[in-house]
Amino acid sequence: MSSKRIFLSENEMPTKWYNLLADLPEQLPPPLHPGTGQPIGPDDLAPIFPMSLIAQEMSPERWTEIPDPIREALAIWRPSPLVRATGLEKALKTPARIYYKDESHSPPGSHKPNTAVAQAFYNKEAGVKRLVTETGAGQWGSSLAFACSLFDLECKVYMVKVSYQQKPYRRSMMHVWGGSVTPSPSEETEAGRQILAADPDCPGSLGIAISEAVEAAVKDDEAKYSLGSVLNHVLLHQTIIGLEAEKQMKIAGDSPDIVIGCVGGGSNYAGLAFPFLRRKIAGQDIRFVASEPCCCPTMSRGQYRYDFGDTTKLTPLIKMYTLGHSFIPPGIHAGGLRYHGMAPAVSLAIKLGLIEPVAYHQLECFDAAKLFAATEGTIPAPETAHAIRAAIIEAEKCRETGEEKCILFNFSGHGICDLGAYDKYFAGELSDFDYPQKKIEEAIAELPEID
């Protein structure tokens, strides 16, 4: 019997992170100061991040050493397995070979601790006492709380209100690891009070929660802000996923023709895809498919423009695919994918034609998750279900054409804390939602005009 699961030993864990910016054929447009509109420097970011992370954010170097204390913490669950989805292949009657990198084995159950551990380490090293952050579905918030517990840091989380209500056990996880959680928008910050004054029933958004977290961090001399996606240093830390997968695919004697992931802010997708993307830049024929929700179609219906990362315009302006910083998506259960912008590095790769965006509805993704759970065992997070849906579609194309393609996708997290969403799915209480073009145009109209 051939191996279904391919493991690496702890000694085979990567010792360096990979920076795609060193190999992209165009330079990333610089972030701009929210007040002056001029390119920002390290000192502008110092109130928010420690200098070590600022250096990584702006680094042109291809490789960055992973400090031993970070690798020791990652070894709690890494390296993660690469799995051949033979049950799913059989159910689909496809000649395609489907593999998934299983990131559900971390203590919080997702890929997010790969950067949470690194950020907690660098902040602790800089003498920071507490980290403040936002979270959508709660995977990031629980991951940062976990990482802070490892490095004896306090953790404060502003959780998007609709997810705070939908996912109580993610809140419980944060509390177990010593974090404090506030539903956003809240009365704790000026940004939150401003939003609630305009809309007392606001369900919240990642943009609003970021505004609250940044404000709270900047006003606290002993705190720094921590972000779970979008920025370069976050994507850098996540490349450990793809670097492990490269070694495991070699052991399997295979190589991906298609690389797939779900995409909200871009971290889990970049983590798997970026190490393989350098092969495409070098001339290898690989397709890269990025899957997002139809109700938050940042890549497929947004514009490549400079925009703020948060709702109240506290963060630097970054050039990215965006639906506009005032965009508030509906409360679908894939809360981690409900962000108005896309990582600048992922955005540039899309603009250059290196990555193909696709968008799927909520119900078809839950259908895909149900099939995956029935054939492979693990219950996927609603976010991860978007990657599974994309992989199924590609496998079905192979069934129709007879092509024996190799499909690799990132299983970014399990759905054990999302069972309430599955209950609603089986009860027929979930619906699909196409975001109205008029609403997107209204949010886009508020973008700053920058050449």
Image (spheres, rainbow, N blue to C red):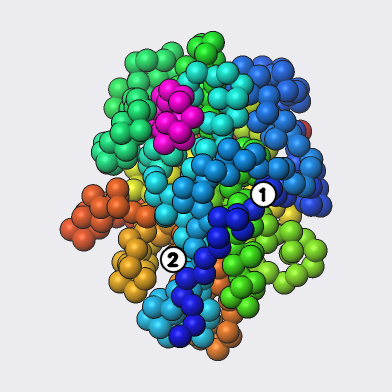
Which segment is the magenta one? Answer: 145-162
- The numbered mark at residue 389 is 2
Q: Earlier in the sequence, mark 1 or mark 2?
A: 1
Q: Which residue: 22% across, 54% down? A: 424
Question: Image quadrant of residue 273?
Answer: bottom right
Tell me: residue 265, above or below residue 44. Answer: below
> Quick one: 375 or 128, which is closer to the camera?
128
Q: How far apart are marks 1 and 2 (CA)?
A: 33 Å
Mark 1, residues whose alpha carbon is within 10 Å: few (<14), some, or many (≥20)?
Answer: some
**Quarter of the figure with the N terminus:** bottom left
408 vs 182, left or right, is: right
> Do the residues under discs 1 and 2 have CB atoms within 8 angstroms?
no
Q: Position of residue 427 (x, y in %)?
A: 18, 58
Q: Where's the C terminus, which quadrant?
A: top right
**Going 40% across and 60% down the picture, which residue do you hit?**
385
Look at the image and tell me whether residue 426 can be seen: yes
Q: Report whether 168 appears left or right of 199.
A: left
Left of 399 or right of it: where is 21? right
Q: Which mark is residue 89?
A: none
Estimate the x, y position of residue 277 in percent, counting from the top left: 69, 59
- In the rendered image, residue 161 lying in the magenta stretch gets the answer yes
Q: Mark 1 points at which residue?
A: 15
Q: Which of the two discs, 1 and 2, sits closer to the camera?
A: 1
The percent position of residue 429, horizontal first and vertical second, equals: 21, 54
What amino acid is at disc 1? Thr
